[in-house]
Image (spheres, rainbow, N blue to C red):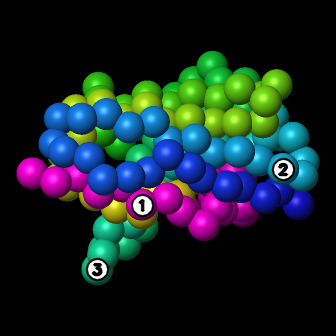
Amino acid sequence: QVQLVESGGGLVQAGDSLRLSCTASGRTLSNYVMAWFRQAPGKEREFVARVTNNGGYTVYADSVKGRFTISRDNTKNTMSLQMNSLKPEDTALYYCAAGAGGQSALGYRYWGQGTQVTVSS
């Protein structure tokens, strides 16, 4: 079993930066692909970014490519999402996930409770 807890969300202005963190307890994160998803009100949960078990390969949604950076530290059982040049359309509840991988939520078995990111224009 893996427990995931997100932190770092908040209210910022367009163009600002935020850094989200995900801390895991239970089994070591190195067993899993890690990812960030987000869900805006009235919309489906969407893929944001993922990183392989050893951190060597990353994939981003086109909407965040070049602005967001995903990283992980298996020694600390943590994962981060550095978000730069934030836009109002980035406003959502951001979830940390761990699992087998891919860009579908179905590929992830463990989920955090989410951290809210709100970007004002």
Q: Specify whether 90 is left or right of 88.
A: right
Q: Residue at x 30, y 39 (%)?
A: 64
Query: Residue lying farthest left?
Result: 121
Give coordinates of residue 77: x percent, y percent: 78, 36
Could you tell which of marks 2 and 3 lies nearer the N-terminus?
Answer: 2
Q: Give the amino acid type for the residue marked by disc 3 in the picture.
A: Gly
Q: Which residue is drawn at 29% across and 26% down?
A: 66
Q: Residue at x 71, y 55 (%)?
A: 4
Instruction: Report if residue 16 lies within the magenta region.
Output: no
Please name the residue that numbered disc 2 is placed on: 25
Q: Residue at x 50, y 31 (%)?
A: 70
Please name the residue that numbered disc 3 is placed on: 42
What secondary structure is marked by label 3?
loop
Separation (CA) of disc 3 from disc 1 = 15 Å
Q: Which of marks 3 and 1 is in front?
A: 1
Could you tell which of marks 1 and 2 lies nearer the N-terminus?
Answer: 2
Task: Determine crowd level at label 2: few under 14, some 14-19, many 20+ residues with C-alpha closer than 10 A.
Answer: few
Separation (CA) of disc 2 from disc 3 = 31 Å
Please name the residue that numbered disc 1 is placed on: 116
Q: Specify whether 96 is left or right of 17.
A: right
Q: Quadrant of residue 42?
A: bottom left
Residue bounds of the magenta highlight: 97-121
Could you tell which of marks 3 and 1 lies nearer the N-terminus?
Answer: 3
Q: Specify whether 74 is left or right of 28.
A: left
